[in-house]
């Protein structure tokens, strides 16, 4: 029996793929601008992370053409090719289209998808998302029509958006519906420390439309792991150290949250990160996609599934983090 059989699952949108209730974000794969790719971790670390994810039953990998300027897709494609068959078929790929100003025709969408498929070394992807709600010369209507055409052509399984507001999501949903294609996901930043989707109408609208929320930065870029404390004087790699929340005062303010995550985790032999991810899963209709830069992080992430916080614990975390959002 594969580990996936024991994991909770979620269906993306009304009729998209059914995947484990936790995905894998690959922004850090190949990105040396924001992350410390090539210095703090290598391709072999990422390859080990990929294998560890699949071994733990985490099969959904979320990438984008812009991550590492195509390097994330290339690495994922290579790792899938090198995984012994038939295990490689276990990887489910989601990638993203970036609406650059010079992409002004439906053909440019088809070409961008073809380039992503080429880097990934696959004939189709399970989910194709629009990275940002930018409209230059290509309108949202034309963009959604181009994506719907690719669903019918069989090169993408489901259509998603990312960083769309409630109104933008509703508009995209409407244009796709005219083509008989549902909107499967809206990928937004969502964590215990960023609860904006709860207050700006995104989560309520997603529930109403049957759209699944993919939560990126679900550990607030490492803040919720408990690794960074005022005493540790540990600086995050890459550009994250510019974030004031990683400063001494920011971390001091965060300590009650970290302590609560630790206390809840210790009762179950779980880490603060696993508790923070479990809280997101427990919101319903939310699929967190934490990053994994090595095998240890990959198997740690998987430990967020298979157990439940009590309603009291969920309420405590919700209340504790209200002031941080």
Image: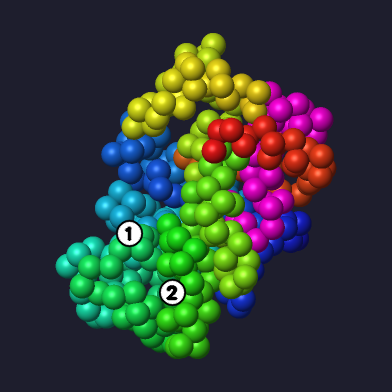
Q: Which mark is residue 253?
A: none
Q: Is residue 294 left or right of residue 42?
A: right
Q: Which residue is mark 2?
A: 172
**Residue sitting at x 71%, y 51%:** 282
Q: Is residue 74 left or right of residue 11?
A: left
Q: Is residue 275 magenta?
A: yes
**Quarter placement of the N terminus:** bottom right
Image x and y of residue 142, in percent: 31, 80
Q: Residues within 10 Å of mark 2 (few under 14, many from 20)?
A: many
**Residue sitting at x 54%, y 38%:** 325
Q: Which residue is mark 1?
A: 65
Image x and y of residue 174, in percent: 47, 80
Depth order, front residue of 193/234: 193
Q: Secondary structure at mark 2?
A: helix
Q: Is residue 272 above or below residue 82?
A: above
Depth order, front residue of 68/235: 235
Q: Secondary structure at mark 1?
A: loop
Q: Earlier in the sequence, mark 2 or mark 1?
A: 1
**Residue sitting at x 72%, y 56%:** 7
Depth order, front residue of 233/70: 233
Q: Is residue 195 magenta?
A: no
Instruction: Please identify the dominant SS of the magenta region.
Output: helix
Read off the magenta span.
Answer: 259-288
């Amino acid at each position: 029996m594969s580990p996936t059989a024991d994991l909770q699952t979620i269906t993306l949108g009304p009729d998209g793929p059914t995947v484990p209730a936790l995905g894998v974000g690959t922004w850090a794969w190949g990105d040396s601008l924001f992350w410390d790719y090539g210095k703090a971790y290598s391709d072999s670390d990422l390859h080990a992370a990929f294998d560890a994810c699949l071994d733990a039953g985490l099969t959904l990998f979320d990438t984008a053409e812009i991550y590492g300027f195509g390097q994330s897709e290339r690495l994922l494609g290579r790792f899938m090719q090198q995984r012994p068959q038939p295990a490689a078929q276990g990887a489910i790929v989601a990638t993203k289209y970036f609406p650059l100003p010079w992409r002004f025709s439906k053909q440019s969408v088809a070409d961008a998808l073809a380039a992503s498929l080429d880097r990934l070394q696959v004939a189709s992807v399970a989910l194709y998302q629009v990275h940002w709600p930018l409209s230059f010369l290509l309108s949202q209507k034309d963009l959604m029509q181009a994506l719907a055409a690719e669903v019918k052509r069989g090169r993408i399984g489901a259509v998603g958006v990312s960083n769309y507001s409630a109104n933008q999501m509703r508009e995209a949903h409407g244009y796709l519906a005219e083509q008989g294609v549902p909107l499967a996901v809206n990928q937004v930043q969502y964590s215990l420390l960023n609860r904006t989707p709860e207050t700006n109408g995104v989560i309520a609208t997603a529930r109403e439309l049957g759209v699944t929320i993919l939560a990126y930065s679900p550990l607030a870029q490492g803040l919720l792991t408990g690794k960074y404390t005022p005493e540790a004087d540990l600086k995050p790699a890459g550009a994250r150290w510019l974030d004031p929340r990683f400063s001494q005062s920011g971390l001091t303010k965060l300590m009650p949250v970290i302590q609560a995550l630790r206390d809840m985790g210790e009762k179950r032999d779980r880490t603060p990160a696993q508790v923070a991810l479990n809280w997101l899963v427990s919101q319903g209709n939310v699929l967190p996609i934490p990053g994994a830069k090595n095998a240890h992080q990959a198997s740690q992430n998987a430990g967020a599934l298979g157990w439940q916080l009590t309603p009291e614990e969920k309420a405590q975390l919700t209340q504790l983090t209200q002031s941080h959002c």
